[in-house]
Image (tube, rainbow, N blue to C red):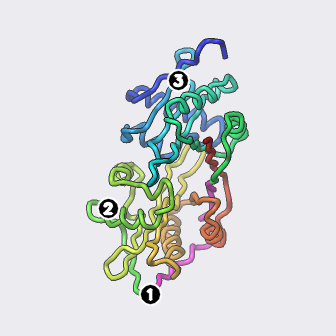
Amino acid sequence: MTGSPTPISEGPLSPDQSALVVELASAAQRADGVAPLSEHVLLHLRHGDTERSRDLLLLADDTVAGYAHLDALEEDTRGAGDISGELVVHPAYRRRGFGTALIAALSAGGGGHAIKLWAHGDLPGAAGLARSAGFTRIRALFQMRMPLTGPAVASPVLPAGITLRTFRPGHDEQAWLRVNRRAFADHPEQGAWTSQDLELREAEPWFDPAGFFLAERDGELAGFHWTKVHPAEAGGSAIGEVYVVGVDPAQQGGGLGRALTLAGLEHLQRRGLEQVMLYVDESNTAAVKMYTTLGFERWSTDVMYRRP
């Protein structure tokens, strides 16, 4: 870096700027083999749906060389909390201090709150940047994968009194949101979903209610398994995803989570997909164990770092 200040501008982003950030993320993915931004941030870039978030662009040679996104404050009952985000630097502009500059800009507008940053793929460069900026590793998210080309997936055995059907757009949203909040009450991202978060995904090209399974008991939603199919990329094939599985806490302990998982896997296998993936917190040892017994193996790791 030269001695002059790094030119960093703050959003909201124009459609053209958002498109440039998506191109930047694609370049980083080609170089690193892992997407640098989450689905949540990519949806934000395309729809501009988060009013209180911050977007920072770092320019070099009149090019968008870096981008950082910071979500709204995760405020707790005492009015304290953390702010979480993500950042990416173009492969052609790394090792110039731009990552450090973006972190400094995020911190300057953080209002004194702790900052948490996701590093997708647990890459050495990201780990080194985190350490040098004073961040500590606090959380890991496993991506696990399983082939679907082998024997048929075992058919689900539903607990007594449970029936299974698929999601009805325009009818099931509020019931799903209620159970999602209950099932993920301790999950900092999934449990905070709003109607807008759900509607954005229902409008995505990949959304398919035929792969969105709802379990009911006495007409009340007890759990769900929402599957997703990622389109084939260059040189690859489409891959299925256990997008989210949730069980109402009052219905846990009877094998419903496993049955719902199998229902979704059976559906994805019938679609002719060769592979399926999922994300699970490293700390959720029960879920990791269940997925391992079904045939999943760890593929990659996303890491969250925090700085007070």
- Give whichever of 149, 202 is nearer the camera: 202
| Tag 2 residue | 173
Q: Distance between the residues labelled 3 and 2?
A: 38 Å
Residue situated furthest left in the rendering:
170
Residue at 57% over, 60% down: 276
Q: What is the count of numbered marks?
A: 3
Residue 281: percent from left, percent from top: 60, 59
The residue tagged 1 is: 160
Identity of the amino acid at label 1?
Answer: Ala
How far apart, in angstroms, are the residues tagged by discs 1 and 2? 25 Å
State the residue lying farthest toward the bottom: 160
Q: What residue type is labelled 3?
A: Val
Q: Determine the secondary structure under disc 3.
A: strand
User: Marks 1 and 3: CB-CB under 8 Å?
Assistant: no
Q: Dividing the picture into quarters, in which one does residue 92 lie?
A: top right
Residue tagged 3: 64
Classed neighbour count for the residue bearing mark 2: other residues with Cα under 10 Å, few (<14), some (14–19), many (≥20)? some
Magenta-colored span: 141-159
